[in-house]
Image (tube, grey):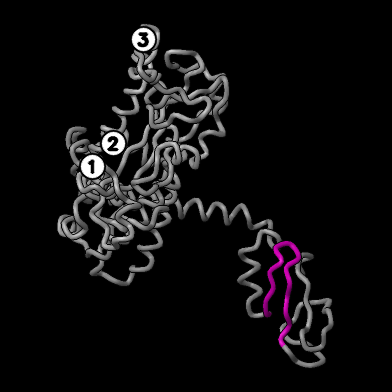
Amino acid sequence: MLSPQIEWNCSQCQSSIADRRKYCIDCHSMLSWTCVGSGKSGLYTNYYRHRDSCDYCTPELEDERQQEMEQKRVSIQQQFQALDDKQCPWSEWRRTNKSCIQHTGHDVEQIQQLYSMCEESLIRYRSHRKEKHKDDIITPYLSPMNVLVVTLWHLKHYHSEQYISTEINLGRSTVNYFLTEVIDISHSCIYPELISLPVNVANNRTPHGPERHHKLIVDSTFIVIPEPYDSDQHKAYYHLKSPTNYAIKIQIVCDFHHRIVHVSECYHGSAHDITVLRESGLLEHVNDSVQIIADKGYIGEDYIVTPRKKPHGGELTDEDKSFNRDINSAGAAIENINQRLRTYAILGVVYRGAIDDFEK
């Protein structure tokens, strides 16, 4: 049966063919086909492979294909779940919340929630790796859940890749590869779910600061780095509060639920707080109804509420002092968040990765 979605032609004779055949009657060249629906084309020998996978050419097979794909997905998922039951470290860490928190910083339920956010991407990644090594009986592989918890373990304690490879009995290059991949997957799947500015924040019924229009709190923190090899970078990365005197700076914003709603890109340690704020895009969301509490490093922008400075040669009034106490008390929330983030060793110790790849 000739599909109405397929046009046949001979590239040598430049003629259209009314019926399907392998070779042209006139010049004996192999015929070509073009799928009107998908825009794909090819030689006769590739037609059946295209037809069996094209929704336009064989729509009656679409339900069957979808069913087969779903069965394959469920089968792969069940195989990985069975692997979770016996494969370390997840098979051991999940026995108690205490063990889970000790290794990853999250309890069992939280890890399962994180996994649900990126399950499809992790399964697709591990299925590809498994297929790539299906004939290699020596190369072991971790289930999707295990690559996630090992990555969380790495972020919590910042163990070296050599140490991790020894503990889970995998090659160092394998560990390096999946840590990079899973961090990218986590950022693309989990970050948008957990960190985002509230929609219509001005009208949301959320706890606010000393005034109703005080909606967010901002502050910067830093990641310690070793002294740069390039002397020209010393000034750019200089940071007075860093133990090494060099750091990467980031800006974090939270609401009055103590929930992180925005994280900036990385900046050189010497970048001023107000510069980071201006380049972060956060000022696009502020107005009379949405104002941000910050410290004195952010003086200079409208709708950014900072403590009042003592006038030259004078003293603060009682009203000013009361105002500053309220602002500083509200601002303590973001400082507490920054301290909690430093319980993750990758942020709390000297960063060992490349410092010039800010996007990473």
Mark closest to the chain's N terminus, 3 or 1:
3
Asked if the residue at tag 1 contacts the one at tag 3, i.e. Cβ–Cβ closer than 8 Å, the answer is no
Asked if the residue at tag 1 contacts the one at tag 2, i.e. Cβ–Cβ closer than 8 Å, the answer is yes
Q: What residue does disc 3 label? A: 322
Mark 2 nearby-residue class (10 Å; few <14, some 14–19, many ≥20): some
Report which quarter residue 242 is drawn in.
Answer: top left
Depth check: 259 or 63 in front? 259
Q: Nearer the viewer, mark 3 or mark 1?
A: 3
69 in relation to 332, above or below: below
Residue 92, percent from left and from top: 18, 43
**Circle 3 SS class:** helix
111 in relation to 81, above or below: above
Please give the label number shown on residue 341: 2
Residue type at mark 1: give it: Gly
- The magenta stretch spans which residues? 30-43
Report which quarter residue 169 is drawn in.
Answer: bottom left
The residue sitting at 82% across, 92% down in the picture is: 26
Mark closest to the chain's N terminus, 2 or 1:
2
The residue sitting at 68% across, 61% down in the picture is: 58
Mark 1 nearby-residue class (10 Å; few <14, some 14–19, many ≥20): some
Q: What residue does disc 1 label? A: 348
Residue type at mark 3: give it: Ser
Residue 59, percent from left and from top: 69, 57
Asked if the residue at tag 2 contacts the one at tag 3, i.e. Cβ–Cβ closer than 8 Å, the answer is no
Q: CA distance from mark 3 to mark 1?
A: 34 Å
